[in-house]
Image (tube, rainbow, N blue to C red):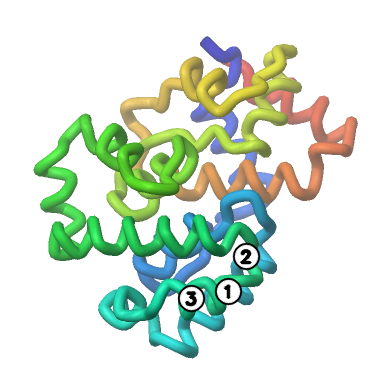
Amino acid sequence: MTSVSIEKLYTYLLQEMGPSGWWPGDSKLEIILGAILVQNTNWSNVDKALTQLQLATGFDPQRILRLESSQLEQLIYSAGFYKNKALAIQAVLNWFQEHQWKYSHIVEKYGSDLRIELLKLRGIGQETADVFLVYIFDQVAFISDAYARKLFSYIDQKDYKSYQQLHAVVQMPESFTYLQAQDLHGLIDEFGKNYLKDPVRMERIAGEVKK
């Protein structure tokens, strides 16, 4: 297991940086789209694609699904890998459509197997599945993305190269709420963007968040 206390890490980051307000988006559909589009790119490219989608469809899932594949690809072009991402968007929106967009019913139906079901969807890997769990289905999960792996690698003095390597050693506290899980992911990413290359800040956080 990791030497990092999730409670201490969250408390430290919250005190240092304040609430993250993450994930950006005015609706769960926008978050779903953003989580797919952000794969292998940066958020500024995603933001451009989301703006185009909103202008063309008003983020209406029916209108998005009625688009020709070529139209959808053109709208999300700025996010890169647009052909694969268009196919993923269509597959994921169709899946939610089959479940009538009833998020709580989906949780009830699949229970602890929900992550497994999400991983069956085209274009949904482990990170995106966990993002969906935390931000769409309001579940407590840890998102061991690149920033998290770099932070935990520094603190634990281990090289967490893969998503699964870190995911397997982090256990979320039973007392943690989904809102805290949402904020924790945002805080880790914001800290990573700003301080991963700052030896003083890295040494300080390592000394504060161990069990």
Q: Is residue 149 visible?
A: yes
- Amino acid type at circle 1 is Ala
Q: Nearer the viewer, mark 2 or mark 3?
A: 3
| 87 over 155 or under it: above or below | below
Report which residue position mark 1 lands on. Answer: 49
Report which residue position mark 2 lands on. Answer: 79
Distance CA(mark 3)–CA(mark 1): 14 Å
Q: Nearer the viewer, residue 82 or 147?
A: 82
Residue 69 rendering spot, x and y as whole percentages:
43, 72
Q: Residues within 10 Å of mark 3 (few under 14, many from 20)?
A: few
Report which residue position mark 3 lands on. Answer: 70
Distance CA(mark 2)–CA(mark 3): 15 Å
Q: Residues within 10 Å of mark 1 (few under 14, many from 20)?
A: many
Residue 86 rendering spot, x and y as whole percentages:
46, 64
Are the residues at dot 1 and dot 2 in contact (C-beta closer than 8 Å)?
yes
Distance CA(mark 1)–CA(mark 2): 6 Å
Tell me what residue is drawn at x 18 percent, y 45 percent: 107
| Label whose residue precedes the other's in the sequence (2 or 3) | 3
Q: 147 left or right of 50? A: right
Q: Is residue 180 visible?
A: no
